[in-house]
Image (cartoon, grey):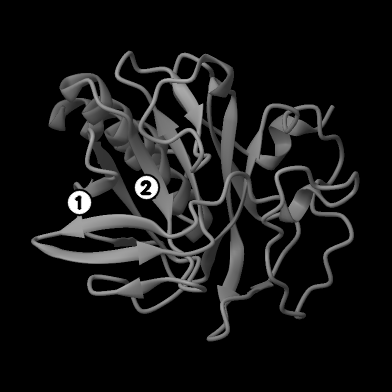
Amino acid sequence: MAIIMGALGYSISNMGGPATQVAASQVASGMSLARQYAVARNRETRFVICNLDGASGDGLPPESWRYWTVIQTNRGSNNWTMLKEWEKLPGGVVFLNVAVAGYSPIGGDPMDGVKLGEPFAPDFRDNASPGREWQFIQSPTNNLPVLVNGKRFKLGNTACIGFRGDGGAVKGDGRAMGSAVGSSVAEEAIRVARGVATPDHKIILKSTNDYYYIETDKRGRVRVRSPESFRN
């Protein structure tokens, strides 16, 4: 597993050195790690983005939209175990959204309409209206109980991408967590972008074209896509 993760991180890091590219490499490695844990232990596993809005308990990071971790279901106990420490994105980079299906056909600038320098709270609804995909957070994990070294915390309104024991990708919908629901299988992508997080759990973007998608197909295979790959 370590060899696979190292090779993936090395290949993506060769794309360049800017912070968004480094973040893309980090997130791709984290998503691949979550999938490897899911297959190795035959348990549903999630790559989780932290938003402290509504979160409580011990073991939480100090900032929203900058940290991620990997968690795995404890079968029959209605809680999840954290498999790695919270990892922070490079400075000046934030998680922007998680898109399910439909994200790839986006043409031109998918962040069109964002007002730079103005804080906004990502949209957590499952069905964002047309034109609002740039702030579409899919599948909240409301009040998800997680165990950390005997301590416990709950995640609030956050987002995640999941993997089943067979390696397939599933939506991080709290209603489907802990079970392999066939209808939940989905193509998904996390976007990292240049920006900052605010103390009140919002995001301020610094660019509308400095971003990367880290996507997985229904089989759970992970790859990175740059803005240029969406433009004809």
At a point 33% along the width and 38% down the height, the residue shown is: 29
In the displayed structure, 5 sits above or below 219; it is below
Which residue is disc 2 drawn over?
26
At a point 49% along the width and 43% down the height, the residue shown is: 174
How many discs appear? 2
Q: Say whether disc 1 or disc 2 marks the residue closer to the N-terminus.
A: 2
Give the crowd class for mark 2: few <14, some 14-19, many >=20 residues within 10 Å.
many
In the displayed structure, 66 sits above or below 228; it is below
In the displayed structure, 39 sits above or below 142; it is above
Residue 226, horizontal then vertical, whole percent:
63, 39
Which residue is disc 1 drawn over?
84
117 horizontally vs 184: left or right: right
Q: Secondary structure at mark 1?
A: loop
Residue 65, horizontal then vertical, whole percent:
50, 66
Of residues 168 and 27, the one nearer the viewer is 168
Residue 220, horizontal then vertical, whole percent:
44, 20
When asked about the image quadrant of residue 120, the answer is bottom right
Q: Secondary structure at mark 2?
A: helix
Residue 17, horizontal then vertical, whole percent:
44, 53
Q: CA distance from mark 1 to mark 2?
A: 14 Å
Question: The residue under label 1 is which amino acid type?
Answer: Lys
At a point 80% along the width and 27% down the height, the residue shown is: 105
86 horizontally vs 63: left or right: left
Question: The residue under label 2 is which amino acid type?
Answer: Gln
Of residues 62 and 170, the one nearer the viewer is 170
